Image (cartoon, rainbow, N blue to C red):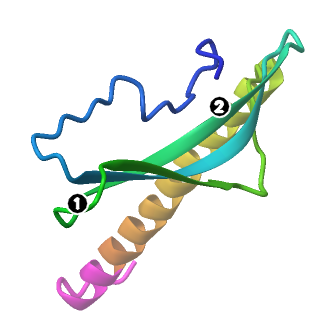
Amino acid sequence: MDTSVPGSLRPLDGVGQDSHSPHTTYEYFLDIIPSIYSNPELVQTKSYQMTAHMHHFEGPPNQMPAVYVRYQLSPITVMFKQRYKQFSHFLTYVCAIVGGVFTVAGLLNSILQSSVIAFQKNVLGKSS
């Protein structure tokens, strides 16, 4: 597996198992997922990622120690694409935020103004 791929999962790196019993069995379950990573320079790296789970149990006294590796290949390929957004996207996001702030401020202003007018009419008895 390529170590230069950002976000690549390598769950079995540095995993070591010690057993003090001569009848220990280890069983690993691997889900292997093909993945493609591409960056803005159009360099594609193909690699595999995997998730691993381990099961450890003591066998009967007449059983030999064993290591089982069970794997499953995923039919789905994960594609990581690194892209840079253009400056026009940034301007669009800023305009949307500013517009949203003005809209909410206008709604709050109209609600506050309506409640002040209703308060003046009902409680103070003033009519404008």
Whether residue 125 appears in magenta in the rendering, the answer is yes
Q: Residue furthest right?
A: 42
Q: Which mark is residue 80?
A: none
Q: Is residue 42 left or right of residue 92?
A: right
Which sits in the foreground, 128 or 38?
Answer: 38
Secondary structure, mark 1, is: strand
Answer few, some or many: residues within 10 Å of disc 2's Cα (few below 14, many 20 plus, some between 14 and 19): few
Name the foreground residue: 56 vs 12.
56
- Residue 44, given in percent of the width and then of the height, sits at 84, 19
Quadrant in which residue 49 is drawn = top right
Asked if the stretch drawn in magenta spans residue 103, the answer is: no
Circle 1 packing at 10 Å, graded few (<14), some (14-19), many (20+), is: few
Q: Earlier in the sequence, mark 2 or mark 1?
A: 1
Quadrant where the C terminus sits is bottom left
Which portion, as a residue range, is magenta?
Answer: 118-128
Seen at 33% across and 76% down, the residue is 115
Residue occupying image coordinates x 18% and y 87%: 123
Mark 1 residue type = Phe
- Residue 44's place in the image compared with 27, above or below, is above
The reply to whether callout 2 and callout 1 are in contact (CB within 8 Å) is no
Q: Which residue is mark 2?
A: 94
Horizontally, residue 51 falls left or right of residue 22, namely right
Q: Which mark is residue 57?
A: 1
Q: Is residue 85 above or below residue 33?
A: above
Residue 63 x %, y %: 28, 60
Residue 5 falls in image quadrant: top right
Query: Where does the image place residue 57, in percent across and percent down from the top left?
Result: 22, 60
Q: Residue at x 78, y 57 (%)?
A: 75
